[in-house]
Image (spheres, helix red, strand yellow):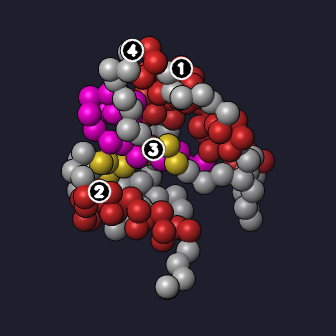
Amino acid sequence: MPEITYREAIRQAIDEEMERDERVFLIGEEVAQYNGAYKVSQGLLDKYGDKRVIDTPITEEGFTGLGIGAAMAGLRPVVEWMTYNFSLMAYDQVVNNAAKMRYMSGGQVSLPIVFRGPNGPAEYLAAQHSQALQSIFAHIPG
């Protein structure tokens, strides 16, 4: 089995799902033209085009909500936050919309959505980019 980086494994997984299902798309800051802040989405814009690999402004709450709405409509978004620290800007969307939608709709609406991004400390990252927030998200019911 070949050894690959986490970055390559994530890219391969996203690519595999985008290849398999045309409803899958990637949305987030710098995921398209810049190939991702950490180059996770490198090559995906060239392969799938700007309708499925979508750059956003720095509006985590906005593009997270857009992803949730797209999932409600039957699409399968991969929402990428540049860092999980910025996911806190979208926390209300995750907790009160994404996590509760199935319950609030009586089981009629599912949200096939992925939220992803780097998490935790790394070299050259400031305090605003290096918190480990996985336990906060792991404890959200739904």
Judged from this view, the residue extending furthest toward the bottom is 2
Quarter holding residue 56:
top left
Q: Does the image show residue 66? A: no
Q: Residue at x 32, y 20 (%)?
A: 108
Percent x, y of residue 1: 49, 85
Q: CA distance from mark 2 to mark 4?
A: 29 Å
Determine whether label 2 and label 3 are within 8 Å by CB.
no
Residue 114 marker:
3
User: Which residue shows up at 40% across the image and 67% down it?
Assistant: 12
First in sequence: mark 1 vs mark 3: 1
The circle on residue 96 is 1
Which portion, as a residue range, is magenta?
A: 67-83
Gap in Å between the C-alphas at discs 1 and 3? 16 Å
Residue that mark 4 sits on: 106
Other residues around mark 4 within 10 Å, as few (<14) / some (14–19) / many (≥20): few
Identify the residue under disc 2: 18
The numbered mark, 4 or 3, whose residue comes first in the sequence reads: 4
Q: Secondary structure at mark 3?
A: strand
